[in-house]
Amino acid sequence: MRPTVHDIAASAGVSLATVDRVLNHRPGVRGVTRAKVEAAIETLGYVRDVAAANLAKGRVYPLVFIVPAGDNPFMRGLEAEILVAGRRSPADRAQISILTVPAFDPLALVEAIDTAAADQPAGIAVVAVDAPEVAAAIDRARTTGVPVVTLVSDLAASGRDHFVGIDNVAAGRTAGSLMGRFLGSRPGPVAVLAGSMLVRDHRERLEGFTAAMAEHSEVRVILDVLEGQDDPMLAEELVAMCFNAHPDLAGIYSLGAGNRGLVTAISARAPKGLRVIAHDLTSHTRSALKAGLIDAVLHQDAGHEVRSAIRVLKAKADGVAVIEAQERIRIDIFLKDNLPPEQRGDLRDQVEQDD
Amino acid sequence: MRPTVHDIAASAGVSLATVDRVLNHRPGVRGVTRAKVEAAIETLGYVRDVAAANLAKGRVYPLVFIVPAGDNPFMRGLEAEILVAGRRSPADRAQISILTVPAFDPLALVEAIDTAAADQPAGIAVVAVDAPEVAAAIDRARTTGVPVVTLVSDLAASGRDHFVGIDNVAAGRTAGSLMGRFLGSRPGPVAVLAGSMLVRDHRERLEGFTAAMAEHSEVRVILDVLEGQDDPMLAEELVAMCFNAHPDLAGIYSLGAGNRGLVTAISARAPKGLRVIAHDLTSHTRSALKAGLIDAVLHQDAGHEVRSAIRVLKAKADGVAVIEAQERIRIDIFLKDNLPPEQRGDLRDQVEQDD
DNA sequence: GAGTTTTTGATGTACGTAAATCAAAAAATT
DNA sequence: AATTTTTTGATTTACGTACATCAAAAACTC
């Protein structure tokens, strides 16, 4: 049987109260006594039963998630996952609320952060816009003792406790590597469709992509970035124009949202043998994968990100160290052959735990 | 605040004892009263505090993992993950023990299963060998009330409560699809290196691979399977012979273990432009990926599998339904550009939770 | 060595649930 | 209506920890 505080007390020859004082860093214990207790903890291999401890403490963690509004499917999926996490949050003593703010709007984001921080929650997770005002707002929150993590999209260093999201440079490199292998020696330029070069993750993906493409043996032209503002209409238009201008186009890397427009443009008229790599598995990219219009989709699991953010924020709130390796978010690669089954029914009916 | 049993009792106008009887399916409650209580549970949205419940119950789950011995790196990694899970098992009230048995030995496995079942643990997880005797042993364990899940390698239907592992047909298809795209129109046959066609997961991977290759536009010869018995020496020899016999070899799919030998053979003398896809990220496949000797590695995360097995067994032991979608193990695809950082230090020092 | 301060012990309550006991009430059976 | 059976209530203890209080003991001052 696993040792309890009683065992520690008995083994150390002290009272329960003293063990408690040592365990919870309460004052009024002599150094020698503390050492005795710590030795007993060590030899018995005692580990605090966190379930019982939380029960006794009645601790709760009010957490605020701030996500961009709009019809970006990934963001809506993220929000759904936050709701899912919120539904089972009683189990992990988290109380999750969601704030949606206009996308790409630093000032609205700043206001949301300030509002959230005013309630002194246990933590804030924010899909960041990479602007100095936002970094300042995050710093303000942190100076009032509220831990802040950035989610999915980071901002320029500091100003946050942790970043929960994929390594976007690595994602871009992966896309470039796949594109290079898919194309082999087939000639022709490659286009890149992004949302906006003002967004950090998009910049990083592009950087990785061009670097990986450059490493390949075949020299290949990478066309100027098409900025589709994550808007399906604009994306479709830009891609169609690109097809016109470059009938020999060999590949497209779509590193942002707006893939509905991309798919429409491709299915309307794509150069023969065009290889397409996109980001984020949504209903559109999924069906395009199945139809062979897209060759590969790089994906980040929103559910993992949400759960990781919760764990990290709770750890920060408790002043506990985060195991970085454990909180790394994986880059999923989906082909039409390893697609996960489509989520049937309502996300809200699911209780996810792990993995 | 979250409702408790007391709130239910008050709301339903019954006593705490009656609520307890309803919640824990104890007898002695009239249908009408039970309905009243259930209505109160529903309207208040009560969910049992499992932490408190487990604390009160003092329930523990003795679980036995049975894994093959030998120097198969994946299996050793699996065992390491089981140990990791065992270290934090007090937290989830699991008591994990490991049994190692000679690989590919149905009779030894049968004996291990019978031995494990004799102790009446809360569940058994077994890396199965697909043999009738093994299925029979699993059936015996289950008739004595011990849930059994197969891990990594399944056996022919029935005879187990659940299979924890990747969809190996899908893995094979993914490999085939990648291989097809990597090769493009480059001519030449493709070889398959397996451990043994007597093992179910290897058979399934091959099946998926050939199917996916057949779907590709380019007609391509798939050579007879090389059975390397998961043995590096034998694998090296077979692959080298294959290089001799087929100087125009375009690709190799290694769907089992023994990749150390494969890598040796490739680095010694591989046909120019050879594309290689292997399974399971180990130190050997990792460095071969980095060196460009292997193009892609399909991987299953042993940590996920272990944690999933624990969750499933506990659920089965409690007679609770398993959310199948949640327990699906993902197929990871690694290129040299999305390799996770190497695990430094000792696995035992890590406390993994999720994702 | 008397007084002061610090340290330790003893004890109780609480968290939310499980499980048991015994008495009381209600229902079913005669 | 009396009896038996079933259902319900009231109460207690326990799980392992946190936290508070008050008294007792030990360690310091001067």
Image: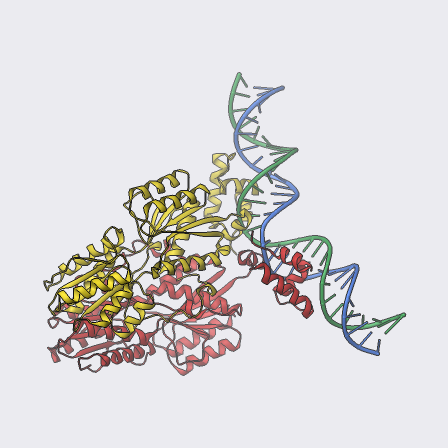
Chain colours: A yellow, B red, C blue, D green
In this rendering, would A93 be left or right of B131?
right
Quadrant housing residue C21? bottom right
* Rendered view: B194 above or below A54: below
Between residues B274 and B150, which one lies in front from this camera angle?
B274
Q: Position of residue A32 (x, y in %)?
A: 48, 36
How many discs appear?
Answer: 0
Residue lying at 53% horizontally and 67% vertically, measured from the top left: B318
Residue A138 picture location, percent across and down = 36, 43
Position in image of residue A80 (x %, y %): 41, 60
Q: Is residue B1 above or below residue B57?
A: above
Left or right? Give the position of A6 relative to A314. right
Can you say which quadrant of the picture contains the C terminus of chain B? bottom left
Front position in the image: A148 or D14: A148
Q: Quadrant of residue A233?
A: bottom left
Query: Would residue B355 be seen by someone viewing this image from the given angle?
Result: no
- Horizontally, is B57 left or right of A310 in the view? right
Percent position (x, y) of residue B91? 47, 56
User: In this view of the protein, can residue A341 be seen by the observer?
Assistant: yes
Q: Quadrant of residue B283?
A: bottom left
Q: Nearer the viewer, residue B242 or B276?
A: B276
Instruction: Tell me if A107 is positioned left or right of A91 in this view.
Output: left
Vertical position of residue D27 compared to residue A26: above or below: above
D7 vs B156: above or below: above
